[in-house]
Image (spheres, rainbow, N blue to C red):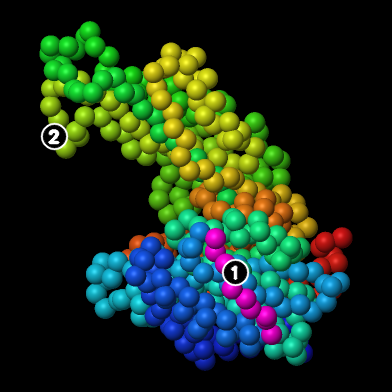
Amino acid sequence: MSKQLALANVRQYLSDGHFEDDLRRRVAIRSESQDPDQAPELARYLHEEIEPVLIRMGFACRALENPNGAGPLLFASRHEGDDLPTLLTYGHGDVVLGYDEQWQQGLSPWTLTREGERWYGRGTADNKGQHSINLAALEQVIKAREGRLGFNVKVLFETGEERGSPGLREVCTEHRELLAADVFIASDGPRLNDSRPTIFLGSRGSALFSLEVRARDKGLHSGNWGGVMVNPAVVLSNALASLVDQHGRIRCRGLVPSSIPGPVREAVKDLGIDRHSLGRSLDEHWGEPGLTLGERLFAWNTVEILTFTAGNPAKPVNAIPPSALAHCQLRFVVGTDWQHLESILRQHLDAEGFQQVEIKIDRCTPATRLDPDNPWVRFAKDSIGRTTPRKIAILPNLAGTLPNDIFADVLGLPTLWIPHSYPGCSQHAPDEHMLEPVILEGLEIMTALFWDLGSVDCRKNNNK
Ligand SMILES: [Zn+2]
């Protein structure tokens, strides 16, 4: 049988309504991991929806104990030969809260509803629709190759992604051998836009930290004490201004990467990001001077002030506030010395005369980025290029943050994400949806990709 037949079959799977049936059942399961009452639904999603599909495809399935007692995990393996490459793929069965009452009239998060090109439902974009596409593509390739894939597959499903994936790192560390593979390919997050098939190779990291100035227990009358007593809000706003200037440029240079590697610069250039390409006109004067807009977004760091409080903003009074607190975030790319964030901040603030500013480092997620010249990226790009005439976007990393370091660093895998959603999908909001043309293209892209992965010739051309 041929690749063309596999593609014809996957198109028919969509046009006959079978993809819709599968997704409808999956969307109807209220696997809201942020609601403890729905915990049984997490296990039900794995056991009633994912396991039967995998078993039908010849996978051996087993539950993996989550040491944090958080959502259940499912591991499955399909082994064809020791000399064949092994793919690790991943999906998450949980969704964010439904916010049922906030959806447009006639829509419910738990009922798949088609309106024009849009398929509405919680999890359509994040992540049920996306992993449903990949599972369907795998199944079509197995059928078209009469029971063989030509490679080994391991599948990892979790149900806590929307709570920060508790336990995933520990499980992957503990089961490194079990999860060993040659390449990681999965689908989550958005494409660059709806018309550009996208591969992203990692994500920016995120470090949350707070800065606080505490001068005294109580507020002081600003008339009686102003001018002779320190105002913590004034001190803190000056400290923040020493970190990042009025144009968003990071002034604390220990918090920026040393350079942008050539292949990353090339890949970002190819995205063609201009003022209008992201659906909202960009502030050209904002960010690091000398960099293109694309480089500022995908290849550089930002310091954001997320909240800034002093006194009672809801009820201002004539008083010097006793303290001031700012929650900040560093979004960073590979090559940033984020492990020493606290000492970099301390040295900078001390040098600028802000010894009284206290620093607290909160949650950090490392950055990851696969070299855009990696052979697996060429393999995927060539395969997608044979499936669709559209220009492919290669993002060295997502501008947002994923715990991709678990796969890239803990498991040591080249990581490729091929998303089937788009920026306007209302992920995490009411009216979440996916687009039918992107579903179709996603099914075609993944079917062809899995076909090519099992074709020795394709692999050889790209990986030698
Ligand atoms: Zn999500």
Other-residue count near label 2 (Cα within 10 Å), few / some / many at <14 / 14–19 / ≥20 = few
Q: Which residue is mark 1?
A: 64
Q: Which residue is mark 2?
A: 315
Mark sitting earlier along the chain (2/1): 1
Other-residue count near label 1 (Cα within 10 Å), few / some / many at <14 / 14–19 / ≥20 = some
Q: Amino acid at mark 1?
A: Leu
Name the spot of residue 133 as percent of width and height, x first. Answer: 56, 76
Identify the image quadrant of the C terminus: bottom right
Residue 301 lies in the magenta-colored region: no
- Residue 270 versus residue 358: which sits nearer the camera? 358
- Residue 228 versus residue 137: which sits nearer the camera? 228
The residue shown at (38%, 63%) is 34
Q: Amino acid at mark 2?
A: Lys
Measure how far apart labels 2 and 1 are at the Cα level.
51 Å
Name the spot of residue 309 as percent of width and height, x first. Answer: 28, 33
Looking at the image, do the residues carrying marks 2 and 1 touch, with CB atoms under 8 Å apart? no
Q: Quadrant of residue 338?
A: top right
Q: Find the magenta span and give its range.
A: 58-67
